[in-house]
Amino acid sequence: MRSARHLAARSPLSGSLPRIYRYVSGNVFTPLGLASALALLAGCATTAPPSPSSTSSQEATTAPTGSALGTWQGTTTSQGNAIRKITLRMAQTGADVSGDYSCEAGNSACRNLNDSGTLSGKVTGDSFAVRIVMSPDNSQCYFTGRLAESIIFGNYQCLADGRIVEIGSWRVKRLG
């Protein structure tokens, strides 16, 4: 049987092989194989159940649902640099969000002249995701992003007839 060093010397990649390769009992261990074996062993390890004090600290670090309640104004910017002014008016029950959407022209008219719509979605921790059904053409836009105390920002994509017709980024700020 040939050694790992002998195999590495014959490989066209021999200059780029890391020294972590070892020849052990007729097998060559790679960094990925070693990491996989360690992960498997760690998964089989037993742990003691958490103590009551560690459970309460874990609950304290779990992010509660953020609040999207209120009126938010900002802009969308398409990949083609079409900028539009948007307003989201949202109500929230638990993680569920509902409300309405309006659009005003910025440096470009609202896509397909859709100047209003209804929205529904969820806020989980600081993650925000809503679907907006646009009027008058009933196309749908999906806004996803991150919710901070007074801003929400992220990306969006709009679909019509099952095809993506616009993608871009958006950012809104809570009024009041």
Image (cartoon, rainbow, N blue to C red):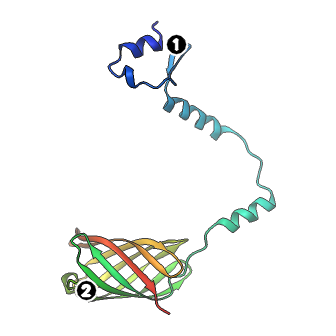
Task: Kindly identify the residue that appears in the image at 64 percent across and 38 percent down.
Answer: 42
Name the residue carrying label 2.
Answer: 106
Residue furthest to the front in view is 15
Task: Kindly identify the residue that appears in the image at 63 percent across and 40 percent down.
Answer: 43
Marks 1/2: CA–CA distance = 68 Å
Q: Is residue 10 above or below residue 83?
A: above
SS category of the residue bearing label 1? loop
Name the residue carrying label 1.
Answer: 26
Q: Nearer the viewer, residue 91 or 2?
A: 2
Indicate the position of residue 34 as horizontal and vertical percent values.
55, 30
From the viewer's perspective, is 52 left or right of 127? Answer: right
User: Which marked residue is nearer to the observer: mark 1 or mark 2?
Assistant: 2
The type of residue carrying mark 1 is Gly
Indicate the position of residue 59 as horizontal and vertical percent values.
69, 66
Q: Nearer the viewer, residue 48 or 26?
A: 26
Indicate the position of residue 39 as horizontal and vertical percent values.
59, 38
